[in-house]
Amino acid sequence: MKTILLICSCLLLLTSCSEWDTRLVFINNTNDTLRFKFEMKLKNDSIPDLSYCQETNLYYIKPKSDEILRNLNNWNTSFELHPNELLRIYIINNDSLKKYGTCETFKRQIFLKRYDFTYDEFKKINWRIVYDGK
């Protein structure tokens, strides 16, 4: 019993050492399930990172719902460490992924929408990205 308590205490301590920054929220105001990816990119680099594109995990967001874009670092820190970069978010239709696959979708840049945000822009929109299909 003491061993189990010790292990649980250690796990709790380890998981509480780093907190995720959960301020950034993506809101899907459409009737469609969407897929998305986000990455830090140089402002003048419009090409998505295609490294390991077959293994790229795209996030799902259900219709009329929201999803927190978590960052292990604080978002402030991410932007401070990359002052010449912005956070780019790619919104993708499931049908495109089924037809072309992940790599081809990104190579052809078949996106419903692409957002490019700086830290100051996120502050202005109160860390809320609303996609309404337009």
Image (cartoon, rainbow, N blue to C red):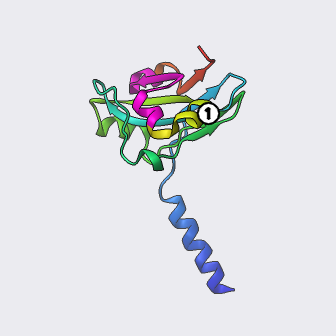
Q: Badge 1 is on which residue?
A: 94
Q: Residue at x 69, y 22 (%)?
A: 30
Q: Residue at x 29, y 36 (%)?
A: 82
Residue 25 position in % (x across, y down): 58, 32
The span shown in magenta is 104-122
Q: Is residue 52 or residue 28 the one in the foreground?
A: 52
Q: Is residue 25 or residue 74 the one in the foreground?
A: 25
Q: Residue at x 53, y 59 (%)?
A: 16
Taking the image as shown, residue 73 lies to the left or right of residue 67, namely left
Residue 134 position in % (x across, y down): 59, 13
| 132 w.r.t. 9: above or below | above
Q: Is residue 101 or residue 115 the one in the foreground?
A: 101
Image quadrant containing the N terminus:
bottom right
Q: Residue at x 29, y 40 (%)?
A: 81
The residue positioned farthest toward the front in the image shown: 99
Residue 78 position in % (x across, y down): 37, 39
Q: Amino acid at mark 1?
A: Asn
| 101 w.r.t. 13: above or below | above
Q: Quadrant of residue 131?
A: top right
Residue 127 position in % (x across, y down): 52, 27
| 116 w.r.t. 99: above or below | above
- Residue 119 lies in magenta, yes or no? yes
- Residue 7 lies in magenta, yes or no? no
The residue positioned farthest toward the top in the image shown: 134
